[in-house]
Amino acid sequence: MGTYLITGATGGIGAAVAGQLRDRGHDLILTGRSPQRLNELARTLRTGAHARTQLMRQGGGPDPDADGPGLRAVVLDLAEPRRLEARLAEEGLPERLDGVIHTAGFVHLGTVDDLEADDWITHMSVNLVSAAELTRLLLPALRAASGDVVFVNSTAGLRANPRWSAYAASKAGLRALADALRAEEPALRVTTLFPGRTATEMQQRVRAQEDKPYDPSDFVSPLTIAKVLVAALEAPTDATVAEVTIRPRQ
Ligand SMILES: NC(=O)c1ccc[n+]([C@@H]2O[C@H](COP(=O)([O-])OP(=O)(O)OC[C@H]3O[C@@H](n4cnc5c(N)ncnc54)[C@H](OP(=O)(O)O)[C@@H]3O)[C@@H](O)[C@H]2O)c1
């Protein structure tokens, strides 16, 4: 069984990925901003359908109850990429990591006329700079396992629509990060997923900002995104699933 670190584990897509990986018996390092949400997720994974008997791993999460066999919770604020190195040093992460899955993300819609420097800085910090910095810090552990790096991008990373400039620019940058990393680190497998609109809290917030109703059945389920992501992780080792686009079925 492997060990995977998931950013944005408390979000719709991240939690679905955590559930899929836990079902397969993998050890998980769950990261997010909120200790409460992390603890809740860890409890669900530990006591629900995902519960598994696994070897005890080292502790160190926000709440001792959140840690346990095969699960560890680590609070990371990705809006502060300069602090990640010290945070990871405090946590003492594993020397071997089978994969890092970047699902954390931030979006706030606005025209170029509306968006201020702080809006741009938050998009870039959370969606791009922290993904690069975290990957850099985890590279030795990933190399040790010939691991996978998965970036949950967005179809907005392929095409910027009005009011999406900051988010789309951060996601276009994330694709560039993935492409360069894939070429630089041939021992690793690097995958970018481009989901279209997906039924999560983020999409609920986006619909509110667009002044449109939110009906989850209009969008892809986060479980579907998680299943595609895990299929990429489980692809035979002679191949890399480099890029996948997933759109809601019309
Ligand atoms: N939903 C969609 O329609 C859609 C479509 C295409 C791509 N995506 C991408 O899919 C990924 C997952 O999104 P989602 O739909 O699952 O959204 P979500 O439910 O809102 O989850 C977002 C996750 O990102 C975390 N996060 C946000 N800001 C953070 C920060 N400063 N530091 C650390 N973690 C932070 C959140 O943590 P907290 O619990 O602390 O808030 C949460 O775990 C994102 O990268 C998003 O851009 C989503």
Image (cartoon, rainbow, N blue to C red):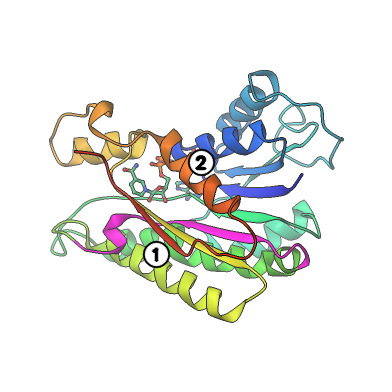
| Pointer 1 residue | 124
Asked whether mark 2 lies closer than 8 Å to ligand 1, one says: yes
Magenta residues, start to end: 144-160
Would you call the spot at circle 2 few (<14 residues within 10 Å), some (14-19), or many (20 or more)? many
Is the CB–ligand 1 distance for label 1 below 8 Å?
no
Near-viewer residue (110 or 247): 247
Observer-nearest of 170 and 188: 188
Give me the residue at 67% from left, 35% from top.
24
Residue type at mark 1? Answer: Met
Is residue 122 part of the magenta span, yes or no? no
Which x, y percent locates residue 65?
Answer: 75, 26
Q: Nearer the viewer, mark 1 or mark 2?
A: 2
Identify the secondary structure beneath mark 1: helix
Q: Residue furthest top?
A: 48
Q: Give the CA distance from mark 1 to mark 2.
A: 19 Å
- Identified at 55% across, 41% down, the residue is 9
Q: Amino acid at mark 2?
A: Gly
Quadrant hosting residue 12:
top left
Closer to the camera, 171 or 205?
171
Q: Give the vertical position of 183 relative to 120 (above or below).
A: below
List the residue tagged with mark 2.
14
Q: Quadrant of residue 194?
A: bottom left
Please report the residue visible at 64 percent of the width from the left and 27 percent of the height from the top. Answer: 45
Q: Position of residue 132 (x, y in %)?
A: 53, 68
Q: Is residue 65 left or right of residue 212?
A: right
- In percent of width and height, residue 219 lies at 27, 35
